[in-house]
Amino acid sequence: MRPFSIPTAVLTALTITLALSSASAASALTIRGTVVKGEERRPVTGQTVQLHVLRGNEEEKGSTAVTGPAGEYQFSGLRADPALSYYVSTEYENAFYTEGPLPQDQGPTVTQGFVVYDVGRDISAVQVKNHHIIIEHQPDALHVTEILIFENKGRTAFLGTGPDHAENAGARIGLPASVKGFEQGMGGDPQTTHVRGRELSSERPIPPGVRPFSFSYRIPLSGRVDLSHRLYFPTASFVVLLDDPKLKLESKALEHGGTRDQGGKQYVVYSGASFGVGQEVRIRIGGAGFWSNPKVYPWLIAPFAILGALWVAARSGKRAREAARAGEPRQAAAPIERRAVPTASAPARPALPMTQPPGGASTDADFRKAYLFLVAALDEGLERGEFSRETHALIRQNLKRRLQALLAEESASGVR
């Protein structure tokens, strides 16, 4: 009797099928949770919950679920993908509750619940316990991280009005001018957080209890930086931390508080307390201007190096012409029969023009090309983020002014 055997091709197909099944099972993801109300945690039945799927900043097709008798909801058939971000949201009494991005590395099931509240507009129970601003000095910008701790001592979620009074907003925060590269942190998301001019607003309500809210951004270096903040909530403590002692903070509302070690770094501390609604904390940061960026110095030196090289080339050309003219008397002392007499068929060669160096190439034209190369390289540096637009404009204007002066000299001398 022949022993039973499985063909190699069949074994290979089975192996691939099992591998694909395992990979599919490993990437499967389910999001579930409950919606309950208030401190008593009463289940909310028939509440709509939405799933938002984002790939980068682009929102893809999501789905909708309705809560059951126990307030439960579930989204299944999803896949864990590092390129995707999942958010869940629900709307209760015109207030949006959003959570996410949800973690995808804690197993095939993610649990995320909602606690919703009745909504009130009384701001008296809400305050900012702490408003921390951490400023880090980078080569071409100030990197700013703001962390706010909201406290709601009431029994209802606070929801005020937005900047244009046509929308609801929980958190409203004043921002400094020239904010670039805004990034949301804790307590917010791209769907409900909006930045308009010098103000941030969030559609999320501020629920009872303590809740953090954070974000970060960049401010290009340009002389004294205005970091003033308008306050929309009573603020118990306002603290600014600077990682560079060369930065000088100017504010009548904040006092210097020495230094503090935080996260392995040492910061200079400025702080104030007990600020009211509508008050503006005026802040100016000095020592962060044009000259604090070391990348600008080569661009400032380059025009002078070009002028120096131009002067050396002109001196060399002058010495060469003087040496050529010095040889003419020796030719005049030679026997008359060996002298070259100009004739109609062989006229005397004219002397080289003063602006034309030996070899026939225009020195001014060469340096004009050098200036144009510097301008192009400077523009590329801006695209790579090495300079702020203000710094780029200042250096480019300086180079352009020197190039225009060179062209004017060429025009006056008739050189093209």
Image (cartoon, helix red, strand yellow):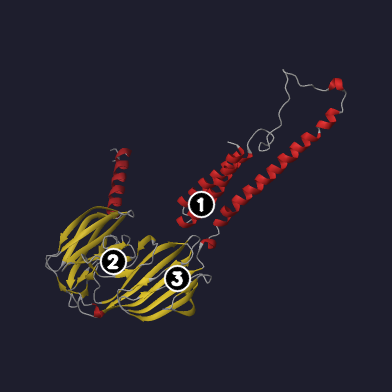
Local secondary structure at mark 1: helix
Find disc 2 in the rendering and name its residue: 201
Q: Nearer the viewer, residue 380 or 284?
A: 284
Local secondary structure at mark 2: strand
Q: Nearer the viewer, mark 2 or mark 1?
A: 1
Find disc 3 in the rendering and name its residue: 284
Find disc 1 in the rendering and name its residue: 397
Q: CA distance from mark 2 to mark 3?
A: 24 Å
- Quadrant in the rendering for residue 84: bottom left
Q: CA distance from mark 2 to mark 1?
A: 38 Å
* Residues at circles 2 and 1 in contact by the CB criterion of under 8 Å: no
Q: Nearer the viewer, mark 1 or mark 3?
A: 1
Quarter of the image containing the N terminus? Answer: top left
Residue 412 in the figure: left or right of residue 107:
right
N-terminal-most mark, 1 or 3: 3
For the view shown, which residue lies furthest in the top direction? 345
Give the amino acid at mark 1.
Gln
Q: Nearer the viewer, residue 313 or 103?
A: 313
Give the amino acid at mark 3.
Arg
10 Å neighbourhood of mark 2: few (<14), some, or many (≥20)? Answer: many
Q: Nearer the viewer, residue 52 or 111?
A: 52
Q: CA distance from mark 1 to mark 3?
A: 27 Å
